Image (cartoon, rainbow, N blue to C red):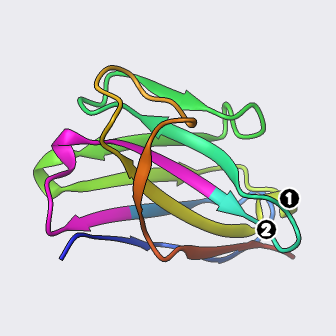
Amino acid sequence: QVQLVESGGGLVQPGGSLRLSCAASGFTLDYYAIGWFRQAPGKEREGVSCISRNGRSTGYADTVKGRFTISRDNAKNTVYLQLNSLKPEDTAVYFCAADGGTYYGCSLRGHFGSWGQGTQVTVSS
């Protein structure tokens, strides 16, 4: 069974940090670019960051650039998103998704066919 599972969300104060994980089972992440997305209540889903198959290319939304860092460990079949300097507006459910159609680089407009169930991030004092 092909599955992506996010973890690492939680409640954190403004300025705090979290590390989200996206673990794959049933398939090998090496063949996929991975994207992180988020959706806040009442808002549309927003692309946050992406990483290429080999991890050498990354992309970030302007709203998180300089604060979030995406990385991957293909040996562990896992992609990470480090969230630093968190703000209340970062509160959302965060999802990871696999893009099997982008062979070089990554794009938040890629072909994301497999999605995880999401992990809640709440930034509040």
Asked whether 31 falls inside the magenta stretch, the response is yes
Along the polypeptide, which appears first: circle 2 or circle 1?
2
Span shown in magenta: 22-37
Which amino acid, mark 2? Ala
Q: Quadrant of the C terminus?
A: bottom right
Query: Considering only vertical position in the picture, is 7 above or below 18?
Result: below
Closest to the observer, 68 or 61: 61
Provide residue 39's location: percent of width, then percent of height.
Answer: 72, 64
Instruction: State the residue at coordinates (43%, 74%).
Output: 7
Provide residue 49's location: percent of width, then percent of height.
Answer: 56, 40
Q: Which residue is mark 2?
A: 40
- Assign a secondary structure to mark 1: helix
Q: Nearer the viewer, mark 2 or mark 1?
A: 2
Provide residue 22's location: percent of width, then percent of height.
Answer: 37, 62
Asked whether 51 falls inside the magenta stretch, the response is no
Closest to the observer, 123 or 59: 59
Q: Residues within 10 Å of mark 2 (few under 14, many from 20)?
A: some
Query: Considering only vertical position in the picture, is 82 above or below 121?
Result: above
Instruction: State the residue at coordinates (29%, 65%).
Output: 23
Query: Considering only vertical position in the picture, is 106 above or below 118?
Result: above
Q: Which residue is mark 1?
A: 89
Q: Quadrant of the N terminus?
A: bottom left
